[in-house]
Image (cartoon, rainbow, N blue to C red):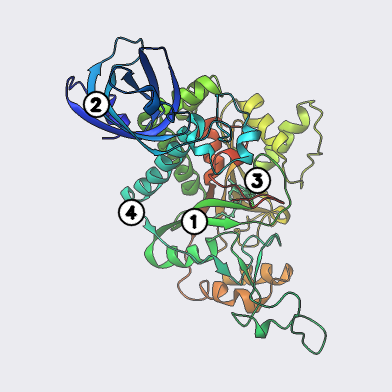
Amino acid sequence: MRISQLLKSTEYGSKVTVKGWVRTKRGNKNVAFIALNDGSCVANIQIVADLAKISDEQLKPVTTGACIRVDGTLVESLGKGQGVEVQADTIEIYGTADPDTYPLQKKGHSLEFLRDIAYLRPRTNTFGAILRIRHAMAFAIHKYFNDNGFYYLHTPLITASDCEGAGAMFQVTTLDMNNLPKTEDGKVDYSQDFFGKSCSLTVSGQLEGELGALSLGRIYTFGPTFRAENSNTPRHLAEFWMIEPEMAFYELEDNMELAEDFLKYLIRYALENCREDLEFMDKMWDNGLIERLKSVIACDFVRLDYTEGIRILKESGRKFEFPCDWGCDLQSEHERYLVEEHFKRPVILINYPKEIKAFYMKLNDDGKTVRAMDVLFPKIGEIIGGSEREADYGKLSARVKELNIPEKDIWWYLDTRRWGSAPHSGFGLGFERLLLFVTGMGNIRDVIPFPRTPKNAEF
Ligand code: 4AD
Ligand code: MG
């Protein structure tokens, strides 16, 4: 039985077996108390070892971090705050953990230290809680879409097209870096590469996702995405997971409604299914976390034009580090001002200048702005980016030409507007940004098991 189940059991007197990792051991000459954890919940189960039954010699290797099996009897606990404990008959050691070398001794390690030993940090209460919440959110995402008639589409990770056009792609090649084949004009000859052309890791599954929407009606992707932007911030990873729904016959308004409903569903799911872990995170790392989660579900998100947002920022009298004139991309300080100080709830900002958004967004009648939407969250800033897509072949191919996007990479995408084009929309939710919000953590490196960031690909 897992410890999470045992702790709820009332079958006092029954024989049980528990297996897990020792968190602490304390005691005296007569009795030892072992706190055991098996990763199924944040709480430990207490093992009581009577030294008349289990010798000192046997107990010696039972140190913090060791893995053991205990056979014994489940009894009602007299200790405060715990319902049951196990009175040990026998203890078997699976693996010892030398106290002189095992890095996770007493509690209270800093998050920075734990990042250096990311291969061990899932054994801490904090990372156990985060990883269980991460699992629950992934499950809830699939459940939400499945229940709402969306199909899970697997889009490729290796691609020849740059969806966001930001030039932040990791190249994929089998060419010998020390001996590159060259064409006559001295450029790298990619025709000799594995795929016969230059390829990269995808920054987004959207372009292929649109093909799915224009055939299956509603799809979503959920997979890793890669960005080689050199942003060393608490909100950027080089490898992150993104959820991208894409829907035929959805206009911007429908897209916003879906994004709001989806986010609220996920937060509600966490509150209903991850209560103990959330209470732990609230107590240890972010007082007020649960209240913040509840407040986001309870309010209507603000829907605001970019132009109006800029006016509010300029009239705020606030001195920002970066300028915020019409045409500027908003920085996290601007987004957080709107959300945390001005409106005090999430904001969906729409109709951005076309120059600061990707080529595929639908142009508004003003010819200057596009039907983009960013969902901005307290403490996070941008959590979702999306838009209604340009469905008109003429307008889309004009934009592709304007931006010098190579036709040879994007012809198939343009073709979707030649045959059976339809109004459609979609968005991308950064999975780790969602987890930052739900767990209350402050650094994105702490909500993914093995973070990839500039100069770091350890483990
Ligand atoms: O706003 P972005 O760049 O939008 C797209 O990629 C669209 N193709 C999505 C779509 O419409 N289907 O990225 C979407 C979200 C951001 O709002 C953010 O939450 C997250 O992905 N994100 C990152 N998360 C972690 N690290 C990074 N480097 C991220 N870049 C974007
Ligand atoms: Mg964006």
- In what element is the residue under mark 2? strand
Quadrant of the frame with the N terminus: top left
Q: Nearer the viewer, mark 3 or mark 4?
A: 3
Label 3 CB less than 8 angstroms from ligand 1: yes
Q: Earlier in the sequence, mark 4 or mark 1?
A: 4
Identify the element where label 3 is drawn: loop
Amino acid at pointer 4: Gly
* Residue labelled with disc 1: 223
- Graded by Cα atoms within 10 Å as few (under 14), some (14 to 19) or many (20 or more), the crowding at tag 4 reads few
Give me the disc on residue 149. 4
Q: Is residue 298 visible?
A: no
Q: CA distance from mark 2 to mark 1?
A: 44 Å
In the picture of the structure, the residue carrying the numbered disc 2 is 72
- Whether 186 is drawn above or below 405: the answer is below
Q: Position of residue 49 (x, y in %)?
A: 32, 20
The residue depicted at 57 percent of the width and 59 percent of the height is: 204
Compare marks 3 and 1 and give the one earlier in the sequence: 1
Q: Identify the secondary structure beneath mark 1.
A: strand
- Mark nearest the camera among 4 and 1 is 1
The amino acid marked with disc number 1 is Gly
Q: Nearer the viewer, residue 151 or 443?
A: 443
Q: Cα distance, mark 3 to mark 1?
A: 16 Å
